[in-house]
Image (tube, rainbow, N blue to C red):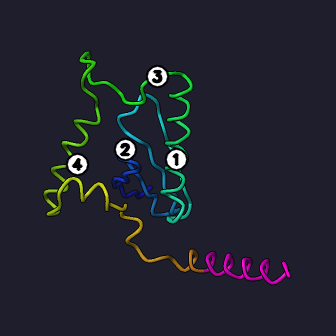
Amino acid sequence: MKTMRDILIVRGVPAIVTLDVETFILRGEFVGLTGKVAFHATLVSELRVKAREALDAFMAQCRSENRHPLQQYGHDASRYVLEDVYAELRDIAERRGLSLEKFVKTHTPFALKRKPTDFEKLMQHRRDVDRRYSLENED
């Protein structure tokens, strides 16, 4: 299985996203949280939405259980794993000539940079036709 990996940042929380280039299934998992928060999408346009939904559900669960969502670093209750992750992100941003803040606000995963496949174009055309047909039948 051939895969590619990149980072997706949603609401300030980074996730590692893996793209299976044979099936074009995107799988992601947030890092630095107290629980496993994973998501997947079959369309690139769904990736950020699915990630937000998974993160929101996790945050709501943490609120209902009255627990902190961030994973602590070692035995020091004042440090969190995300501090180390962001230190690594700062290095990546600097290599790309960006500030950490700009990198976090504007970073989009590798998959958004590729052109749609013929299959994805066909599926989008089908959705467009279905949408047009449903709008015409509403009258």
* Residue holding disc 3: 67
The residue type indicated by label 1 comes to: Phe
* Residue holding disc 1: 39
Ranked by sequence position, the earlier of labels 2 and 4 is 2
User: What's the residue at 28%, 18% (across, down)?
Assistant: 77
Ranked by sequence position, the earlier of labels 2 and 3 is 2
**Which range is magenta?**
122-139
The residue type indicated by label 3 comes to: Arg
How far apart are the two marked residues, 2 and 4, measured between alpha carbons?
A: 11 Å
The quarter of the image holding the C terminus is bottom right
Q: Position of residue 23 (x, y in %)?
A: 53, 62
Tell whether position 18 is magenta: no
User: For residue 123, which quarter of the picture?
Assistant: bottom right
Ranked by sequence position, the earlier of labels 1 and 3 is 1
User: What's the residue at 52%, 42% (across, down)?
Assistant: 56
Mark 4 or mark 3: which is in front?
3
Ranked by sequence position, the earlier of labels 4 and 3 is 3
